Image (cartoon, coloured by chain):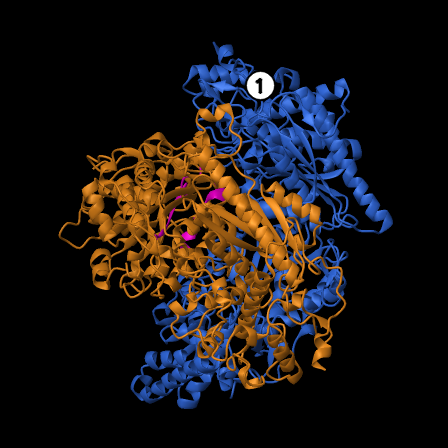
Chain colours: A blue, B orange
Amino acid sequence: MVMQAVSPVVITKSPAYGKARSTVGGAPLSADEAKKIHAYWRACNYLALGMIYLQDNPLLKMPLKPEHIKNRLLGHWGSSPGLSFIYTHCNRIINKHDADMIFMAGPGHGAPGVLAPVYLEGAYTEIYHDVTQDEEGMKTLFRMFSFPGGVGSHCTPEAPGSIHEGGELGYVLSHAAGAAFDNKDLIVAAVVGDGEAETGPLATSWHINKFLNPARDGAVLPILHLNGYKINNPTILSRIPKEELEALITGYGWTPYFVEGSDPESMHQAMAATMDKAYQDIRNCQKAARESGQVERPRWPAIILRTPKGWTCPQEIDGHRVEGFWRSHQVPLSGVKKNSRHLALLEEWLKSYKPEELFDDEGRFSPALKPLSPRGERRMGANPHANGGLLKRDLKMPDFKKYAVPVESPGKSLVENTRPLGVFLRDIMKLNMTSFRVFGPDENTSNKLDAIYDVSKKFWIEEYLPEDQDGGELSKDGRVIEMLSEHTMEGMLEGYLLSGRHGFLSSYEAFIHVVDSMFNQHAKWLDIANHLGWRQKIASLNILVTSTVWRQDHNGFTHQDPGFLDVVVNKSASVTRIYLPPDVNSLLSVANHCLKSENYVNVIVVDKQLHHQYMDMDFAIKHCTKGAGIWDFASNDQGEEPDVVMVGIGDIPTMEALAATAMLRAEFPHLKIRFINVVDLFKMQPASEHPHGLSDHDFDSLFTKNKPCIINFHGYPWLIHRLSYRRTNHDNMHVRGYKEKGNINTPLELAINNQIDRFSLAMDVIDKVPMLQVAGAHAKEKFRNQQIDCLSYAHEHGIDKPEFSNWEWPL
Amino acid sequence: MVMQAVSPVVITKSPAYGKARSTVGGAPLSADEAKKIHAYWRACNYLALGMIYLQDNPLLKMPLKPEHIKNRLLGHWGSSPGLSFIYTHCNRIINKHDADMIFMAGPGHGAPGVLAPVYLEGAYTEIYHDVTQDEEGMKTLFRMFSFPGGVGSHCTPEAPGSIHEGGELGYVLSHAAGAAFDNKDLIVAAVVGDGEAETGPLATSWHINKFLNPARDGAVLPILHLNGYKINNPTILSRIPKEELEALITGYGWTPYFVEGSDPESMHQAMAATMDKAYQDIRNCQKAARESGQVERPRWPAIILRTPKGWTCPQEIDGHRVEGFWRSHQVPLSGVKKNSRHLALLEEWLKSYKPEELFDDEGRFSPALKPLSPRGERRMGANPHANGGLLKRDLKMPDFKKYAVPVESPGKSLVENTRPLGVFLRDIMKLNMTSFRVFGPDENTSNKLDAIYDVSKKFWIEEYLPEDQDGGELSKDGRVIEMLSEHTMEGMLEGYLLSGRHGFLSSYEAFIHVVDSMFNQHAKWLDIANHLGWRQKIASLNILVTSTVWRQDHNGFTHQDPGFLDVVVNKSASVTRIYLPPDVNSLLSVANHCLKSENYVNVIVVDKQLHHQYMDMDFAIKHCTKGAGIWDFASNDQGEEPDVVMVGIGDIPTMEALAATAMLRAEFPHLKIRFINVVDLFKMQPASEHPHGLSDHDFDSLFTKNKPCIINFHGYPWLIHRLSYRRTNHDNMHVRGYKEKGNINTPLELAINNQIDRFSLAMDVIDKVPMLQVAGAHAKEKFRNQQIDCLSYAHEHGIDKPEFSNWEWPL
């Protein structure tokens, strides 16, 4: 009865079935090798299936019973066999050539297919000591998979050898490229799921080949796994005509090698032949470039592996097609604990891999098969590139203080805030040419960081035109990476960091939202990694957010969005840091700190235009170390409780708050104003919530317990309330910030529309300070009129009144 | 001297230069037609240039002087000439065939190149009455461009004929497909910028051709504009070998027709011949499908237009290459107000278009050229499809009450919350087969909405295998669109709505973050559109966020992110709505409301698993209308002030809060608990901040002025503080929610780790209610032990204790 159910259904014309058909011919495996490699794969499949189903009886020594089955069946079978198949053939290449390879599983849910060979090679046991290479260990391996307190069903940080979780799809190729940069001998085998391949980020990341230098960088070997189905649908790439798929991959600049079929024996031969060819292609391309010094883009190989979804599972269950169909996506037989027929089917299925030939009675892996796993650090589950902190060296840093701009007197000189940072980054790059990279979606020049190009130009390996010599800043030697894809830039940087290097990404503020979800995933990775003693710390992800909301004179409303910070603050306090330095020297101090840090995401918000300078370097360092503090030059409450606290957070809001302070002090010489600038945003949060949070005592002594605080903030104003709602003086905090009141505006007009301008702030003070509520009426009217006058001027002339755009701190 | 500067530099081998080279041969334009079409294009270029530079002297009647130049030069020349070129040739096709076409400019910053022909065709004047078709009007046109209070430098909502702003890049093809669906005669000319083409969303959206039915839908004509450069970099697609580009477009399933060069005369002929061919291809494909009833995917035409960036601007300025290089991206001559040589160059450049041949002395467009603009609604600036509210018809809605589930007694029966919604959507689809669509990234079945397929299956035009007949739900007649790209789904839905139809998108909660930035852009569009009297209201963007954070037993930490709401609340209150219905009937009531609404983004958060039902339909309607209210069945404070207020927001948090309430009432019969459920999240915000906000009076009478409120929230807890920090009782509000404490967890374990579970809530109450702080010690210990016991059980068995997962409201 059981046999009847698993008896083959009529094979359809699905191109995933049948004897192997492949672009590369030949049968390189001897009969013995073929037998062994198939056995190794069977072992992987057996273990994968065990992880999904079994909590006991791992070697099937007893007849399978309901109590051996986990209470909840969580995990995904669908792509596991394909992943193990690829992993096994990568192992063959590693052994044959002593190759340095790591493995990235794009189809995140196929963790059983990756964890299985990682266990077989012993790497799993070295980290999880109780998962021994015997029956008891196998039982623990099975039990802990997708189990509370255990390891997840993706290639999570807990998975040895993984630096690509794949929980959210789309980033495997950009991660792979990041890992390959400046690792000339490394090959990253990157399995692209055909579901994942439909995402935007993955679709554009095929272009990574335009950024890999065959002389200097490692290689990415994409293996597009045409598994055929997503959760409930066929995939697009598995169903378009083969000629179109071939054209597509060719058009992306790769040489496609197809391997298609389901017959194991011929598939092993075809895959081995194809892997041999791909490996030789890669090494030939690299050798040619390295020996000749001629760097051209090779048409690197890419493998297209078409196999049935759920390969080797029952073809039909209860009259429904399973293998080679979407029904094998997750847990193909889900009722096994209660359905005896299903239980028998499962037992049959498990036994179809002949575990008795693979493991001895104690559960030890067959000595004949063991040598198929590479050894030591060549094992992909133990390759140090996939635990990058092991390889990370401290960044060599020049003294950031030497990039300081002189500040004789605060608020009197204008400098483009990001430009000296570009010089600092240039010199960091000079000292760390093979372990530091700068990424940007086409905007390093626009963001005033172009000093970098003095040391390293933008990598460019495509057609080069004569005009490129005058301002193109393109070079085959360049290490700056620019592509108009925030996704690809972020992904490459993550891959670079996770494999043990350092880097920096800059983006327009509004469009950093494009990678909100990538930030989320990386922050989650770091959060978990922090709890794993064996994962060494990696360099922080440093994101410069510039071209900010307040200076979008060209671009208008679409380019005004400071809300990335609201996304960042939702992630674990142990991995998130946000800085809003108001001038050059504070930016340099902050950047220096961030570039030296580990396991954080550091977000630095600063505009690229000309801005006032307030702090000389000594003061900037002190101020940034505190993270929030009083600016004496702007305060007149020395030694006394102030009447009002004025707070600037961010460059432009700080300038407007200073201007308001000056106006108020001119009008009301006896008004005692304390001026605070906050650089480190998390200072606003209680120390119990964030390690950077000020203690309540320190917060109260800065912000007072009961005086009005007018807080002028760079972002959405509510974020400040969200951070500080528990503070003693919260009820007196009046926060201004961006309120979605924008269009084509002059800078001051935009500030006025959102009430972060000097006039609004000065009027806020008059409203909130009791002693001014009557006495200030005249001044308030004056400020109001000045404000109206500014708006009229902007609408008439298209620019701000010169006296306001050329404002200097007057005191 | 001036002439010297504009004298031609040596033309490089750039393939953008020279006589036209094109796939399609022929020269269909008569000499007169060619001359006129070129003159029309010159007029566009003249106007575009005027918009960027001039505030006076629009016809150059006087010698150009600094005072004629705007104070700030804001706008982008680089892609404008190419956009006008394409627009002009679309006009020719419209006139020739009486074709129904709209225009989408992917390179957003090229607005001058679109606004110019919109002005010439009179559509601009019909909306902006002071922008008359004469000298004064031209001056106003120039002046208001990218000027405070004027129109922006993208194709913003203010731009007649635009439903694609392009401020953020990447969405032109998905928007175009959305507009083409169910508009069988419409052709959407979609210009893809080669910068934009590098983004992920654009890269995958070439696959829109897999979702267009030639019999039933309109067509998208992509025109990839190889303009060559981004801000400071060459583009990838303009520099890869032509064979690769051809393969890429072919691989995406299109028939590429190249048009390359810079020589205007031959370029007009080549473009006309190519547009003729593309138009005929489209109509032939459609005719074949419509006449035969045989629906196959045509290899639709796509045009690849390669022209020099900044085409027709000075080739060199101050010794630097400008035309055909990135320097022409923005304002090629930026110092004209102060640099007399540049001013003379600009004058020369303006005069090179011979405005005197194009406009008469009064600024009226030449009568000989006027007929080149289409007439009436055929003008792309006046086509009603691009002001979709004009065409929108009310959705025909069945009575949602008939999908109600019976609820005899609250909290005693389990139903999958989204399943009846699927039936409701099915019947809406049945009544609105050509004006309602459901989109999802592969998850309508997973999200339990699969009843839809009874009426309309998933559209599928690729290979169809025998197994698809059993559960494939694929059909060439289907109108449900599924592709594993949140970007493409969101973009298609936006295009469908903006062109006057209705729709619905569902997504996994964590991965709706993938389209954070698309949401931002659409919300901004609606916000501006709300202020434009001539833009008719469109149907709301309805997003169902499901597979929520609290039920990710398979997926773990990567799939736990309720932070999309934090993104949504930052956008204008006039366009944002958030609902968290706790059960089926409230979900139906909310969905009914959302589907009827206009110009909002409605976000509905509800899980798809089995959940308790609390409200019968009558009560659900009343409750949802209020948005927040007391649940009497769970409250025992009738007629009195409660000792504590327990609040549930969201399905699972509500259940846990109810369970805590039951536990507390069993322990402390005299404790008066008020139970509140909030469906409409913005009720928490003051009425002054959001139109849905409760008045302070109403809020205080619900939440009390001084009693402890334990609020159990679906999302990140701080969001509640951000909304309610101004409320009287805010200091007594203790909010629980998701705090990034997750991994592979059972549902209850995850709740416990984040303290939204019944035990934590009950202990919170004991801590916060003065009368329990001593009396509750024993109960607190008991709850703590139960909690520990639950965690142990989960870690031992991999599931929650049955008594908790089968919990029912016991009172």
User: Who's the residue at 56% across and 48% down the image?
Assistant: B278
User: Who's the residue at 23% across and 51% down the image?
Assistant: B625
User: Who's the residue at 22% across and 43% down the image?
Assistant: B665
User: Who's the residue at 54% across and 75% down the image?
Assistant: B50
Q: Nearer the viewer, residue A31 or B235?
A: B235
Q: Which residues are magenta?
A: B539-566
**Residue B188 can be seen, yes or no:** yes
Report crowding for label 1: few under 14, some 14 to 19, many 20 or more residues within 10 A (C-alpha). Answer: many
To which quarter of the image does residue B81 belong?
bottom right
Residue B154 horizontal/vertical position (percent): 50, 64
**Residue B554 can be seen, yes or no:** no
- Residue for badge 1: A59
Q: Nearer the viewer, residue B86 or B739?
A: B86
Question: Given the image, on which type of amino acid does mark 1 rest?
Answer: Leu
Relative height, residue A621 to residue A394 (above, below): below
Left or right: residue B180 versus residue A291 is left
Residue B619 included in the magenta stretch of the image: no
Q: Nearer the viewer, residue A138 or B529?
A: B529
